């Protein structure tokens, strides 16, 4: 049998090399993109929303019809009424930046492909790869190179959205009539004259179609980019999904729809050829309008740096500026908004008076990627962590002491089951009720999975190694004959391990045909409570999933803890000289004056706490 190609190891080596040797370049790119996104976001929020709506309505009337004007005005009025104006403007800034980068890079590459068959043969397969690779794959490298925030969101959006601009530029130039090319050559046109006066003008409709698709794809990345800390309307959608707030998610989704339709119609109508006498604005007038709008944007954008700017340390005017704090924006980086660890982190921020720290939502994967980057560079970092987790096996980490018990006492991971499971599947019910193991047991599986072994194979190996425990769990239970059974779990490393182990035992020892669904915490609880899922071994109680338990406790059965003594809290690398959350307090926030070392520590880490998903209860409590 042919050995498996070490593609994952190759990619990881390339990423590590780039992270070390191209760090300076990535810092420059990050600074430029942050400035551009901040420029546009600030520009769009500079005028009052009603003034902005009037301006955008006038532009819509000049380039389109009355229907477009009415939709644009009513749509943006709806966004303002729903209270998502600032988030929508942040998203618009991200989309415009992504589109501009894609256009600046994509059009020259498209021209190159049109002029060189060799370039086309090489670049076309790369474009196929970029468009078909799942968008989530781009998130971790982007976080590794550019940390969390809007910059990796823009980078991922550009990679995902640039192919249509390149393809349609190439196609538009290739479709220019050969007779026209021969005529331009006959009149002695240079290559530049032929390109800019013949080919590009004739290819403009096709090229604009490519730009239109690039803008739409950039907008489609908004929600995905929110998983790595990009703010905007996508973060509201993601937060609503993880917290099962259907109405709020629909409202935020409407804002995305309005923005998408307006951008689509604007780009379609801007240079759309029209019948003679039908166009309200001539091509020359459109050029003048575009130039005037550009000038207004530049002037207004520049003015935002001189009007109403808050130059205080954290934007709150609450003390002397801290250089590192200003550099990182006093941000606390968390996971998804529905996670209980977010609530605990919010509570810790309140309990310890960490007023300068800001909690930023992200994802568990982004958190661990940021941790890995910091540890490799020996940089200080604070994350919201929990055990069992493979990062404690891979890195030398320590919990910060929590004297005020913001994170509560040790928790348990419980198995929950739908109502009626005991009657419908008594064998599975009894097995799940007996199933209990330790963090050390789980750690064996987690280390194996991190070493590259598939979760299914790791579960099989563990079950064979610990046959005595499996026998204890299944003793006296008679196997069934292929009955279906459905599990759900959150994609945390601990739950991946437990769910795969349960699936293996249910299938190979008890005769069930198991389906395991990977979902977010909210849908996991909803599925069990509604009876769509039979059981889940991934309920963290009493704190992390406290909100879900309060909502669904009467609609499901708690089979008890399958693991006890799990822990959550703020975690730092062992090389950091900090012991307690109280060490994060500064002179302005602590109830008593902080020591010099405490203030220095806050400066050292840039007033940042790196957390997991915003849906984790622990993270939310630390921010309160």
Image (tube, rainbow, N blue to C red):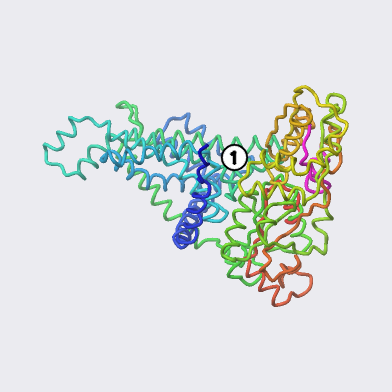
Residue placed under numbered mark 1 in the picture: 79
Residue 526 at what x, y percent from top left? Answer: 76, 33
Query: What residue appears at the point 76 percent right and 67 percent down from the top-left corner?
Result: 580
Number of numbered discs visible in the structure rendering: 1
For residue 311, side relative to residue 618 (left or right): left
For residue 135, side relative to residue 398 (left or right): left
Q: Which range of residues does the magenta coloring cover?
A: 535-551
For residue 466, side relative to residue 290 (left or right): right
Give yes or no for residue 425 being in the magenta stretch.
no
The residue lying toward the viewer, choosing from 143 and 589, is 143
Give yes or no for residue 549 being in the magenta stretch.
yes
Mark 1 is surrounded, within 10 Å at the Cα level, by few (under 14), some (14 to 19) or many (20 or more) other residues, namely: many
Q: Determine which quarter of the picture holds residue 318.
A: bottom right
Residue 332 at what x, y percent from top left? Answer: 66, 58
Query: What residue appears at the point 75 percent right and 57 percent down from the top-left corner?
Result: 569
Residue 536 vertical placement versus 362 (above, below): above
Q: Quadrant of the C terminus?
A: bottom right
Residue 517 vertical placement versus 20 (above, below): above
The residue lying toward the viewer, choosing from 64 and 477, is 477
* Local secondary structure at mark 1: helix
């Amino acid at each position: 049998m042919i050995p498996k190609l070490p593609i994952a190891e190759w990619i990881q080596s390339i990423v590590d090399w780039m992270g070390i040797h191209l760090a300076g370049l990535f810092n420059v790119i990050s600074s430029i993109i942050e400035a551009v996104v901040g420029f546009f976001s600030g520009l769009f929020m500079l005028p009052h929303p009603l003034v902005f709506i009037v301006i955008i309505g006038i532009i819509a009337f000049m380039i389109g019809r009355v229907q477009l004007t009415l939709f644009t005005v009513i749509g943006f009025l709806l966004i303002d009424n729903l209270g998502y104006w600032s988030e929508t403007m942040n998203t618009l800034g991200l989309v415009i930046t992504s589109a501009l980068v894609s256009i600046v890079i994509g059009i020259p590459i498209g021209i190159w492909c049109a002029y060189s068959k060799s370039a086309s043969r090489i670049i076309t397969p790369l474009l196929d790869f970029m468009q078909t690779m799942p968008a989530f794959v781009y998130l971790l490298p982007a976080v590794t190179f550019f940390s969390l925030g809007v910059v990796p969101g823009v980078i991922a959006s550009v990679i995902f959205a640039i192919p249509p601009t390149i393809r349609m530029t190439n196609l538009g130039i290739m479709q220019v009539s050969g007779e026209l090319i021969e005529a331009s050559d006959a009149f002695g046109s240079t290559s530049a004259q032929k390109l800019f006066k013949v080919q590009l003008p004739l290819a403009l409709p096709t090229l604009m179609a490519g730009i239109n698709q690039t803008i739409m794809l950039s907008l489609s990345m908004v929600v995905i980019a929110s998983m790595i800390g990009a703010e905007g309307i996508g973060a509201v959608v993601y937060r609503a999904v993880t917290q099962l707030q259907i109405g709020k998610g629909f409202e935020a989704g409407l804002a995305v729809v309005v923005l998408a339709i307006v951008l689509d119609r604007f780009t379609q109508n801007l240079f759309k050829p029209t019948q003679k006498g039908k166009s309200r604005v001539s091509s020359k007038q459109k050029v003048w309008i575009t130039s005037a709008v550009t000038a207004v944007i530049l002037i207004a954008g520049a003015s935002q740096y001189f009007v109403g700017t808050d130059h205080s340390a954290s934007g709150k005017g609450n003390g002397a500026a801290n250089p590192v704090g200003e550099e990182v924006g006093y941000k606390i980086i968390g996971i998804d908004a529905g996670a209980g660890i977010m609530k605990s982190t919010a509570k810790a921020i309140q309990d310890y008076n960490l007023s300068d720290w800001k909690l930023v939502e992200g994802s568990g994967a982004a958190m661990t990627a940021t941790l890995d980057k910091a540890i490799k560079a020996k940089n200080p970092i604070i994350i919201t962590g929990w055990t069992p987790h493979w990062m404690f096996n891979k890195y030398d980490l320590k919990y910060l002491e929590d004297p005020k018990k913001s994170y509560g006492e040790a928790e348990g991971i419980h198995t929950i089951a739908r109502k009626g499971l005991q009657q419908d599947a008594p064998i599975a019910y009894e097995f799940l009720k007996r199933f209990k193991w330790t963090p050390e047991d789980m750690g064996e599986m987690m280390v194996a999975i991190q070493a590259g072994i598939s979760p299914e194979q790791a579960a099989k190996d563990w079950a064979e190694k610990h046959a005595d425990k499996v026998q204890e769990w299944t003793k006296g239970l008679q196997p069934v004959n292929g009955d279906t059974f459905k599990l759900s779990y959150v994609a945390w490393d601990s739950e991946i391990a437990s769910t795969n182990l349960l699936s293996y035992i249910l299938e190979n020892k008890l005769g069930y045909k198991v389906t395991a669904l990977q979902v977010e915490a909210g849908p996991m609880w909803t599925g069990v409570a509604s009876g769509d899922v039979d059981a889940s071994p991934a309920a963290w109680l009493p704190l992390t999933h406290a909100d879900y338990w309060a909502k669904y406790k009467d609609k499901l059965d708690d089979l008890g803890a399958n693991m006890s003594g799990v822990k959550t809290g703020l975690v730092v690398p062992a090389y950091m000289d900090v012991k307690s959350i109280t060490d994060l307090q500064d002179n302005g926030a602590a109830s008593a004056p902080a020591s010099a070392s405490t203030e220095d520590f806050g400066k050292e880490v840039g007033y940042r706490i790196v957390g997991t998903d915003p849906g984790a209860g622990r993270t939310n409590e630390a921010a309160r």
